[in-house]
Image: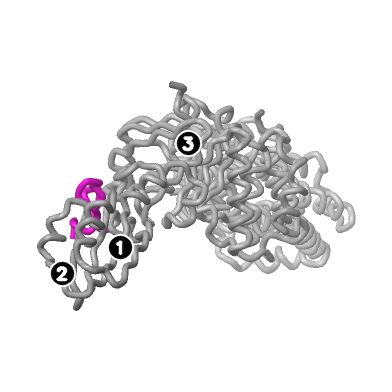
Amino acid sequence: MRAEILTSLRRVLRDHRRGFAIWAAALSAITFFYMSFWPTMGQAMVDAIEGMPQGLMAAMGYDRIGTAAGYLEAVVYGLLGPVLLLVHGIALGGRLIAGQEEDGTLELDFAAPVSRARLYWERLAAAWLLVTGLVAAITLAVLVSNPLFDLDVSPANVVAAGVGLWLLVGGFVTAAFAVGAATGRRGLAVGVVAGLAVITYVFRGVANAAGIEVYAALSPLSWFLRPDPLANGLDLASTLQLAAITLVAAPVGLWRFRRRDLMT
Amino acid sequence: MTTPVIRTRGLVKDYGRTRALAGLDLEVQAGEVYGFIGPNGAGKSTTIRILLDLLRPTAGEAEVLGQAPAAGGPALRARIGYLPGELAMPARVTAREQLAHLAALRGGRGSERVDALAERFTLDLDRPLRALSRGNKQKLGVIQAFMHEPELLILDEPTSGLDPLLQHEFLDLVRETSARGATVFMSSHVLREVESVADRVAVIREGRTVDVDSVRGLRARAGQRVSLTFAEAPDLAAFEALDAVRDVRLEGATLHCLLHGEPDALLKLAARSRVTHWAARDLDLEDLFMDVYRYGPDGVDGANGVRDAR
């Protein structure tokens, strides 16, 4: 008899339920907290950055911080959201196969009547559910505080930005998961993918400050924010670009995972 | 003859430049309790992990229940119970949750036997796994391996961490499992842990099978240490000339030797003089294995006796 369906997925959710609750609560609280600054800080921001070098402000994504959509983008979608989610998500992705393989807690799962492919997809799906929940927590915090603090950003556009953030973070989580599954080395997976995430930030900064388009083309963070989802809504090309990270990384990771030695 | 439950031929496994298995041959028949003995690092766990398709062999063949582990896949693993040598458990869940998870991975099989086995091994199912001692974790490992009543049990160092009472209980469980027709393949670095239940034993060293025999056969080959005290010091050369006797020493009027096979010739020679005291003791099988470990297959070449290899 084969494994009951979703056993591995449920197990990941069980293992992470407490961590998830804490992260979801913290992310909503932080988001709400920063949103609450807008009414008092909005004009002050504009004044504050007036004397600052234009290039630096553009690199930080603060050049439009005087508008509600610009403030939301600079603070939540360009900085806090991706940084916190990527830090947590990349660690999670590296842990779900490679980390637990290294500490031995997956050995009995590997030896059970479940195929490596099933184990891989179920654990990856669980990672996506956790990411979905955390992005939803941020999105809800924005939607709730939006009218409270007079930001006047269209809720549809908030959801569109949420979709972009979801695909961006999910892509990096999948990459960390896939590298971990392909190599069995958690440190390697987290290191490589965290490095790519840092490069993504640097490239976006360089692209914005110096206007060098090739850097924007290479930075998933630019793919997400360039079309300005908070002002323009969902952009199809950008959405597909972000989804491509996952669609490429996931099968490659599985291909290698099915062929290699486990627990060495 | 029926298909062996486990069969390997010329099994080789390299980790980078390190050769863990160097052409291992094994044949375990259905219904056997089979001991797999070797020092740490001899390749026991590597072999076991190949049988479970955790590792893929570099060369050679492995078959479990008639199928290559990779080809058999999940359907083959459903017929095996596995106890890892180093059991790591997730910290936050309880033993009950962990066993329910493992049962679900096996299509729900075994969950109905959890309570009875937990009672038998006195394991508290409702404590989180991080609070369990090494012995209690090992109990959990034993329960999960046996609970779905698999056809084949592959147990890597199963008794490590269990106290003597539970070791006894565990060996009873192995006997019951064997009685219902299942095959048990268990590794150990000490023969003592398997000799009371194993039908046959394979000894491996540096990735090769160096010896396969029944426990009784091994014991016979290990021989006896014999001491004979005479009224007057005997002629050493006459005793040294005997075929079945090795390692002859004289200590005053007491002759010490190692006997393999029948004692007849030794006794008849000794009886020509007056014997005032005698003692014979079965050689500990551990001594035999220490020699196999140290000197390899030649050290147990039956006809020559163990000690000659020195």
Q: Residue furthest bottom?
A: B252
Few, some or many residues within 10 Å of mark 1 (<14, 14–19, 20+)? some
> Which residue is located at x 67 percent, y 64 percent?
B132
Query: In the rendered image, which residue does mark 3 sit on?
Result: B53
- Name the spot of residue A137 as percent of width and height, x first: 78, 51
Please name the amino acid that badge 1 sits on: Arg
Task: Identify the chain of the residue marked 2, using the numbered disc in the image.
Answer: B
Please name the amino acid that badge 2 sits on: Pro
Q: Which image quadrant: the N terminus of chain A?
A: top right
> Which residue is located at x 12 percent, y 67 percent?
B235
Instruction: Calculate the distance from the C-alpha at mark 2 to the C-alpha at mark 1.
Output: 18 Å
Q: Which mark is residue B225?
A: 1
Q: Inspect this view and state whether residue A213 appears.
A: no
Decide which of tag 1 and tag 3 comes sooner along the chain.
3
Q: Are marks 1 and 3 on the same chain?
A: yes
Residue B245 shown left or right of residue A181 in the figure: left
Provide the secondary structure element on which disc 1 rests.
strand
Front in this rendered view, residue A120 or B149: B149
Q: Is residue A89 above or below residue B110?
A: below
Instruction: Calculate the distance from the C-alpha at mark 3 to the C-alpha at mark 2.
Output: 61 Å
**Main SS of residues in magenta:** helix
> Which residue is located at x 25 percent, y 46 percent?
B302
Q: Look at discs 1 and 3 and give the one toward the viewer.
A: 1
Query: In the rendered image, which residue does mark 2 sit on?
Result: B234
Task: Identify the chain of the residue marked 3, using the numbered disc in the image.
Answer: B
> Which residue is located at x 28 percent, y 58 percent?
B291
Magenta span covers which residues?
B294-310
Q: Is residue A179 magenta?
A: no
- Name the spot of residue B134 as percent of width and height, x first: 60, 63
